[in-house]
Amino acid sequence: MDKKMLLIILVSIGLMVSCSTSPVRKVVPADLGIRYGKPIFSPSISEEKAIGLAKSHMKKPAAEIVAEYVLFSNDQYYTVDSSGQKDYKFQDVPAWVITFKRVDWYSNGPIPRMFIADVNVVINAVTGEYMEMFVYGSE
């Protein structure tokens, strides 16, 4: 699965969660299969460097930018081998999650609509590599 397809799936999942008929509530990363653990080592990449790297993947203006150093896991990003075994791409990876808050974002679908979103860019805290992006509606 390529990165664009993953982004489309995560945005779609976020919209389904936020557009359900149940009472409105804030979508959280766990709703998208994303978990944060507590790292025990310091990151190799500084917060400032991680923000700079994330900005190169996010060209839209944000009301605020927040960085969080975590052990990043995405339980919905995996491949399945011929025996049915899941191979998870990101499990407990030291990473910076850079959140661009209150960004004008367009949904996917037959009739795209603009909504205010929190856009999260995940940067590997050891290598500085881009890992993924996920989006959900902002407060």
Image (cartoon, helix red, strand yellow):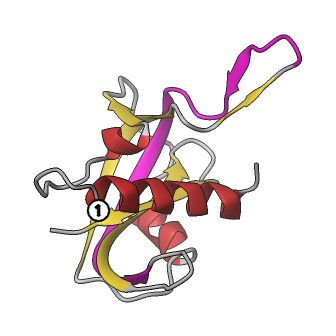
Q: Is residue 46 visible?
A: no
Q: Quadrant of residue 56?
A: bottom right
Q: Position of residue 121 (x, y in %)?
A: 47, 61
Is residue 102 shown in magenta?
yes
Q: Residue most toward the right?
A: 82
Q: Quadrant of the C terminus?
A: bottom left
Please tell me whether the stretch drawn in magenta is mainly helix, strand or loop. strand
Q: The residue under label 1 is which amino acid type?
A: Cys
Q: Is residue 61 left or right of residue 72?
A: left
Q: Is residue 117 left or right of residue 1?
A: left
Which region is colored magenta?
Answer: 82-106
Of residues 124 and 18, the one drawn nearer to the viewer in this rendering: 18
How many neighbours does mark 1 have within 10 angstroms: few (below 14), some (14-19), or many (20 or more)?
Answer: few
Tag 1 secondary structure: loop
Q: Is residue 113 above or below residue 48?
A: below
Q: Is residue 107 above or below residue 124?
A: below
Q: Residue at x 29, y 62 (%)?
A: 19
Q: Residue at x 57, y 55 (%)?
A: 9
Q: Residue at x 43, y 37 (%)?
A: 33
Q: Is residue 7 visible?
A: yes
Q: Residue most toward the front?
A: 21
What residue would you read off at disc 1? Answer: 19
